[in-house]
Amino acid sequence: MKRRTLGILCLVVPISLIVCTLSLYAILSFILASVMGSSGEASSATVLFGGIVKAILSALGLIAVFGIPLGIPIGIYLLCTPEKLKGTK
């Protein structure tokens, strides 16, 4: 993979991952709230599924948050430095 492509990915992936994670978390919360209804009763399978998916989305969000301070400087470095030619040290 070229340095330019890798630099752009380092800049874009953490930010887009956090946007997607927050969107999916909000959508899932809305769906689970509508399934439970006003009485607040739902099957244990629905609650378990919702809890597992929310935990996975929370872990992805955590990875994205930690990836932003790491990915942005690495991406800028990869974009700003020239590619080394083959055969040079």
Image (tube, rainbow, N blue to C red):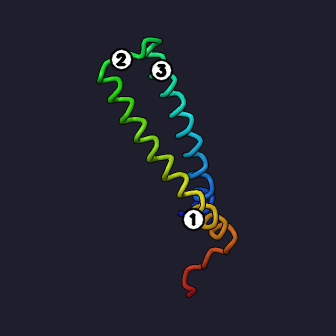
Residue at 60% x, 79% y is 85
Quadrant in which residue 69 is drawn:
bottom right
Question: Which quadrant of the figure contains the C terminus?
Answer: bottom right
Amino acid bearing label 1: Lys
Instruction: Assess disc 3: are there few (<14), some (14-19) or many (≥20) residues with their C-alpha within 10 Å of its C-alpha.
Output: few
Residue type, mark 3 in image: Ala
Q: How far apart are marks 2 and 1 (CA)?
A: 50 Å
In the picture, the disc for residue 2 is 1
Residue 87: x and y, percent? 54, 84
User: Looking at this rendering, what residue extends furthest in the right direction?
Assistant: 80
User: Nearer the observer, disc 2 or disc 1?
Assistant: 2
Disc 1 and disc 3 in contact, CB within 8 angstroms: no
Who comes first in sequence, dot 2 or dot 1? 1
Give me the C-alpha separation between circle 2 and circle 3: 10 Å
Residue at 63%, 74% (x, y): give it. Answer: 83
**Picture quarter containing residue 73?**
bottom right
Identify residue for label 2: 42
Q: Residue at image x 43%, y 12%?
A: 39
Quadrant of the image occupied by residue 26: top right
44 relative to 76 in the view: left or right: left
Q: Where is residue 33 in the image (x, y as percent from the top left)?
A: 47, 20
Provide the secondary structure element on which disc 2 rests: loop
Placement of 49 over or under 16, stated as above or below: above
Instruction: Say if 67 sits above or below 40 in the image.
Output: below
- Which residue lies under the disc numbered 3? 33
